[in-house]
Amino acid sequence: MDKIILKLTDVDYYYPLQGLETFHALKKISLWVEEGEILGLVGESGSGKSTLAKVMLGISGKIRGEIRYKGINIHGRSWRRMKVKPIQMVLQDSKSSLNPKMTLFQSMEEPLVLSGMKEKDEREKRVREICHQVGLDLSTAGKFPGACSGGQRQRASIGRALVLSPELLILDEAVSSLDVSIQGQIVNLLKDISEKMNTTIVFISHNERLVDHFCTRILRMEKGRLLDKNQDMHPIHKKEKEPLSSSKSI
Ligand SMILES: Nc1ncnc2c1ncn2[C@@H]1O[C@H](COP(=O)(O)OP(=O)(O)OP(=O)(O)O)[C@@H](O)[C@H]1O
């Protein structure tokens, strides 16, 4: 088997409610993520996909079970407290994840500033590289989010997530609000990035056709549980990465 970078064993998650009540959102989730793969996570609305993504990122709250990143038990540890995080997430709403008062370029530069990269020239060089990778020209990168299209903003959100070279990128409905042709372009871009940078991707989407085209393995959630219990017994869900035409209807 390929190298496992993230492994969850019997993970339960409970959201705190009013008083002493809790909501049992994840039930006995066991899964692994292999280095370099594009793992798709599908399931109906409310099945727990976003909660699972947040647990991978270190959400606070009542968690049971074991979460190991590269063999290290990260249970209860928040990546948010670390300057350079090995896991990054891109959400559906690029408007809310980008600061409206910063240009796309500045938003992509900010994680470098926060990580302690002091030289402005060095930071700008890195952001120019990332702009090239995510297909944003520099004049667009100089605009504020309000003056950009959804696709341009989403490229910048992906660029911001990639600028510190994360090992694992989680995309939670990250292309859902975009036109079909733009979805295809962004998915091709992600595939390219995953191949060139060996970035591992967890891709959450309602769009099963898109997931089927894009992902190398697919897991399904239902009511807080994972349906594919014995993951290596589902070879039909495991395939080689194949090119996706951006004009194809997905
Ligand atoms: N902060 C919260 N407090 C209490 N319950 C929550 C909270 N956030 C989510 N839930 C509940 O947890 C369950 C799983 O929600 P989650 O957002 O993870 O589902 P999802 O599969 O990502 O849904 P969608 O596809 O609609 O985004 C739902 O029943 C939801 O109501």
Image (cartoon, rainbow, N blue to C red):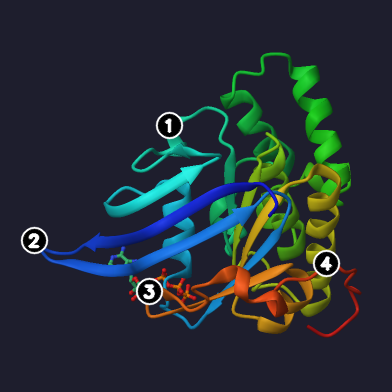
Q: Nearer the viewer, mark 3 or mark 2?
A: 3
Mark 4 / mark 2, whichever is N-terminal: 2
Please report the residue visible at 32 percent of the width from the left and 69 percent of the height from the top.
25
Circle 4: element type = loop
Q: Is residue 238 visible?
A: yes
Q: Determine which residue is flagged by label 3.
A: 224
Q: Secondary structure at mark 1?
A: helix
Of the two numbered discs 3 and 1 on the same chain, state the one appearing first in sequence. 1
Disc with the residue nearer the chain's start (1 vs 2) = 2
Horizontal side, residue 170 vs residue 244: left or right: left
Q: Amino acid at mark 3?
A: Gly
Which kind of residue does numbered mark 2 sit on? Leu
Q: Is residue 99 visible?
A: no
Q: Quadrant of residue 24?
A: bottom left
Q: Tag 4: residue type? A: Glu
Give residue 236's position: percent from left, percent from top: 71, 80
Q: Which residue has dot 4 on it? A: 240
Percent coordinates x, y for residue 177 in the rendering = 65, 73
**Residue 81: mark:** 1
The residue that mark 2 highlights is 20
Residue at the far top: name it. 119
Q: Nearer the viewer, mark 3 or mark 4?
A: 4
Question: Taking the image as four quarters, which one is ligand 1 found in?
Answer: bottom left
Distance between the alpha carbons at the discs numbered 4 and 2: 47 Å
> Which is closer to the viewer, label 3 or label 1?
3
Number of disc labels: 4
User: Which of these two is toward me, 2 or 21?
Assistant: 2
Question: What is the C-alpha distance between the residues marked 4 and 1?
Answer: 35 Å
Q: Disc 2 beta carbon < 8 A from ligand 1? A: no
Q: Earlier in the sequence, mark 4 or mark 1?
A: 1
User: Residue 26, which numbered label?
Assistant: none
